[in-house]
Image (cartoon, rainbow, N blue to C red):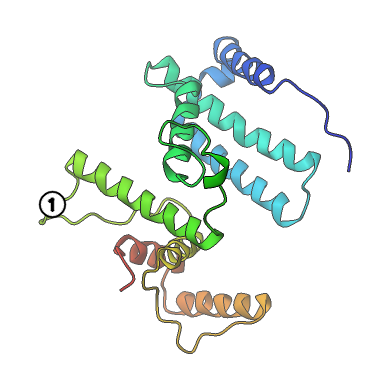
Amino acid sequence: MDKLEPLDAAGELERLLWIVRMLREHCAWTAELDHDALTSFLIEEAYEAVEVIETKQLGETFAAELSDVLFQVVLHAQLAAEDGRFDFAKIAHLLAAKMVRRNPHVFTSCGELLPPEKLDALDVPAIATQWEHIKRAEKHQAADTAGARNSEQPATQSVTGPALATAQLMVARAQRAGEATPDTAGLRFTEADELADHLLAVVAAAEQAGLDAEQCLRTRLRSVDTFQ
C-alpha cells in the first residue's frame, strides 16, 4: 500500500470552499445552477461512487468519486449561503451534533469522549439497535414539534431513493430495532445469482401484468409504518 500523502485537511477544505465561491461568481455555467438543476448530478455522482465500491476500485479512483460527491455537497451549501439560509459550516455542525446524539456509547452529551472505562461497552448489534431507537425518537419528536401528526391524516413513509434499496434499508432497520419484518415463508436464497434471477422474474411478471415494479414498491413503502 502506498504511503498516504500528508495533506492539510482544513486547508484543503478551505481552498475548495473558496474555489466553489469563485466559480459561482465568475463561471457563467456554474452561476446558472440551482438546487433543482443539480439533483440529477447528485444522484449520478452517488451511484458512481457505489460502482467503484462494488468493483473494488478503492484507491485513487474511489477518492476521485468521493470528491465528486463532496463537490455536490459544497455547491449546494454555497447556493444556500447565497440565499442566507445556511452554509457548509452549518452542515458540518449538524452532522457532528447528530453523531454525538446517536452514539452515546462513545460521546458524552457535551460531545466529549467518554472515559476509557466506559468505552467499548456495547457490541455491534446493541449499537445498531440503539442507533435506530434514537433515530426514531428524534423523528417522532420532530414530527410532534412540527404538528405533522394528527388522527385525520396519518404520516406516510418517505421514499427518497430507489424502491428496492429503500425497502432493504427499511427492513434492515426494523430488524436492528427488533421489530417485525415481512413474512419470508417459502423464500430462501443461498446464492446471489439465485436471488437476482428471482428478482428478474418478479420484474418480468410485473411487465406482463402492465405494472411498474419500481412504482408499485415505492407506493407500498409509503404506506408502511411498521411491517406488523
Relative image position of residue 48 (x, y in whole percent): 66, 46
Location of the N terminus (image quadrant): top right
Q: In this orientation, which residue lies closer to the viewer: 199 or 1? A: 1
Question: Residue at 47% of width from left, 32% of height from top?
Answer: 111
Q: Secondary structure at mark 1?
A: loop
Q: In the current view of this chain or complex, which residue is farthest to the left?
A: 152
Q: Where is 29 relative to 97, above or below?
A: above
Please name the residue that numbered disc 1 is placed on. Answer: 150
Q: In this orientation, which residue lies closer to the viewer: 37 or 122? A: 122
Is residue 209 rendered to the left or right of residue 73?
left
Question: Residue at 77% of width from left, 47% of height from top?
Answer: 58
Q: Where is 140 relative to 110, above or below?
A: below
Is residue 12 rendered to the left or right of residue 126?
right
Is residue 67 rendered to the left or right of residue 187?
right
Q: In the current view of this chain or complex, which residue is farthest to the bottom?
A: 186
Relative image position of residue 9 (x, y in whole percent): 68, 23
- How many neighbours does mark 1 have within 10 angstroms: few (below 14), some (14-19), or many (20 or more)? few
Relative image position of residue 26 (x, y in whole percent): 59, 10
Location of the C terminus (image quadrant): bottom left
User: What's the residue type where badge 1 is placed?
Assistant: Asn
Q: In the current view of this chain or complex, which residue is farthest to the front?
A: 117
Relative image position of residue 8 (x, y in whole percent): 72, 20
Question: Residue at 57% of width from left, 75% of height from top?
Answer: 200
Q: Where is 127 relative to 66, above or below?
A: below
Q: In the current view of this chain or complex, which residue is farthest to the right?
A: 2
The answer to whether residue 162 of the structure is visible from this angle is no
The answer to whether residue 25 of the structure is visible from this angle is yes
Question: Residue at 44% of width from left, 24% of height from top?
Answer: 90
